[in-house]
Structures are given as structure tokens and as C-alpha cells.
Amino acid sequence: MKKGKHWYDYIWIWAIIYFSLSFFNIIFAWLGMIDFMLPLAFAIFGGSKYFCNRLCARGQLFLKLGGQYKLSRNVVTPAWMYSSIFRYGFMIFFLTMFGNVVMQTWLVASGAGDFQQMVTLFWSFQVPWEWAYTAGGVPDWVAQYSFGFYSLMLTSLLLGLIAMLIYKPRTWCSFCPMGTMTQGICKFKN
Amino acid sequence: MTDKTKKRRLAVVNADSCVACGTCFAVCPFEAMEIYKGCYARPVGERCVGCGICERNCPIGCISIKIREEAV
């Protein structure tokens, strides 16, 4: 029996909406926390990867671009990229960088750090992003967190797109930090 | 009397290397793959016809199509 379309088959649209909204108004970057909290909630309370399998907008977008629109070379991902050491190493690195974003937010909130209207790509390249925020709308620390979090989200999107172009459409999923974390939780629980 | 058998194509997942990304679940036209307890992918019952779509899309190549002989 062939499967019909489900509402969550269109969830890839969310990825486009999220990155577009945040591009013009950085405060929308906070919505990305949904992509952080939901997979963990499903894994911790449900013991499943429901989010990765059905609700991951990014994974669906890669599959659409790489599979349906054939933008992927469709070459099998190299073994080191889905080895446990790389997956868990990348997850720890990613969480450390997330901790850095939280730390910067804390410094701005406490007045010990300067507010920077910049998006940092690949954890190295600072790109001025002034158009996306008008000072005074929200407390500086709220905006600082938005810039930091959007940096992480955009960097991971670009990494995923590069992996999609070079290897398989959903190569990103093989070392996605959230996927690694939720699979680890599920294995631990089950 | 001879036992009758039929050959059947079936997706086989290497559970040790599967990262449970759900790509096979997403691309399967027959809803024949599931992510077992969030740990690894596996074919669901008799639904799998061994079409190979999951094999082609699996990012890490941990799915293969095998032919099995089954009693009729």
C-alpha cells in the first residue's frame, strides 16, 4: 500500500520561513529553540526519534533539494563522518559553542560584555548583520542570544548544504548533534 | 512432496552502524521502514518489497537489499 501525504511532509517549508524571518528580524531566531527542545522532549519522554523522522524541517529540505531536485552528487558519506568518535566529538564541540553563546548572552545581560550585532559563520567569520535589529525593541541580551543562536543555526544549515552537495542529501543527519544526542538518549532508555 | 518456496527481495539494515536519521522512513513509498525505539531502522513486517529506494537514499549506506527464500 502506497503512503499518502501527511501534514508533516510539508514541514520543510518551516526551515525556509525560519531562516527568512530571522534574516530580516533576528529576534525570530529564538523560534529555533523549538528545534532544540522538541527532539530532546521526544527522546526523553517518548524514547523515540519522532522529531528526526517526521518533524525535522532541515532534513526534509535537504532531501527535497538533494533528492527531488537532484542537487546532490549522491555519493555515500565517508565512514569517518558517521563514526562514533566523530559524531560524539562534533556533538560535544557543538554544545560547547552553544554554551559560548549562552555565556556571551550572560555577559551582555550583566553589563560585563559588549553587545555585538554580528553573525559568526563557521565559528570563525564575523559578518555584520545590522539590518536585522533595531536597538531598543528588546533588551540587548535577548538580541545577543538571537545573533549567537542564529549563527549556530545558519552555520549548521550551510554545513548540511555542503554535505548534501558533496555526498548524500541527508548526510548532515549522520552527524547532526541533535540526532546524535537523541539516538544516544533512546539507546540509553531502551 | 516438495516444499514450495518463493524468492523475496527485502531491505536489510546494519543496526550497528545505523544512525536512525529516518531517511529510509521518509523515502519509503510503502511505509515499510520504522525507527525501532529511536535506535535503528528496520523493515516493518511484510510491507517491504525490496524496491531499494531506502538503500539509494541512506546517507551512510547501511541498508542493503537481500533476496530471501520463503516458504509459500
Image (cartoon, rainbow, N blue to C red):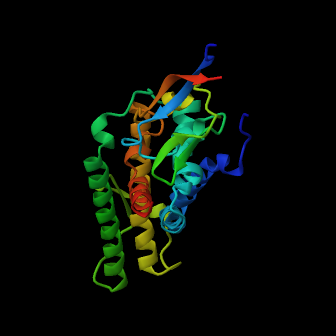
Q: Residue most toward the front? A: B1
Q: Residue at x 53, y 60 (%)?
A: A22
Q: Residue at x 61, y 32 (%)?
A: B48
**Is A5 on the left or on the right of A124, as rendered?**
right
Q: Quadrant of residue A109?
A: bottom left
Q: Residue at x 51, y 79 (%)?
A: A138
Residue A1 visible, this angle: yes
Nearer to us in this view, A32 or A175: A175
Nearer to us in this view, A189 or A118: A189
Q: Quadrant of the N terminus of chain B?
A: top right
Nearer to us in this view, A14 or B6: B6
**Is B69 on the left or on the right of A165, as rendered?**
right
Q: Where does residue A177 sit, x and y in percent of width and height?
A: 38, 55
Q: Residue at x 26, y 54 (%)?
A: A89
- The relative height of residue A47 versus residue A160 in the rendered view (above or below) is below
Q: Quadrant of residue B26?
A: top right
